[in-house]
Amino acid sequence: MELQFEGDELKSVLNRLRRAQGQISGVIKMIEEGRDCEDVVTQLAAASRALDRAGFAIIATGLQQCLTDPGRSGANGESAEQMKARLEKLFLSLA
């Protein structure tokens, strides 16, 4: 199944991923500098939330596309219902 992102959707997901990337770089630097454990964990939690939000946005887009175009077949000829089940499984993997 290929997701098709509109301009704003793609921009939002990429911004979230870039934010997470910056936060992870910050965590690495904090650890290298021997920063306070609480500060490191707080920054790590922020990065985790940013990744989760990006993942949810990607899956939500896929579910929306699947539900608005139920006749669309997925990879390897899977039915729309199989695509939906696969997207739901992905969604639950982030929960």
Image (cartoon, rainbow, N blue to C red):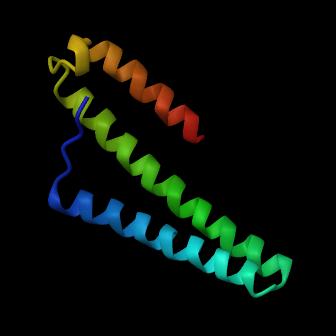
> Which residue occupies 39% across, 40% down?
59
Residue 61 locus on image (x, y percent): 30, 43
The image quadrant that residue 36 belongs to is bottom right
Q: Position of residue 40 (x, y in %)?
A: 75, 76
Q: Quadrant of the N terminus?
A: top left
The image shows residue 50 at horizontal and vertical percentages of 52, 63
Most distant residue in the front direction: 32
Using the image, determine if residue 5 lies above or below residue 13.
Answer: above
In the depicted structure, whether residue 10 falls above or below residue 32: above
Q: Quadrant of residue 34?
A: bottom right
| Residue that appears at 21% across and 12% down | 77
- Left or right, residue 41 beside residue 76: right
The one nearer the camera, 83 or 70, is 83
Q: Residue at x 73, y 73 (%)?
A: 42
- Towards the viewer: 80 or 48: 48
Report the number of discs.
Answer: 0
Q: Quadrant of the C terminus?
A: top right
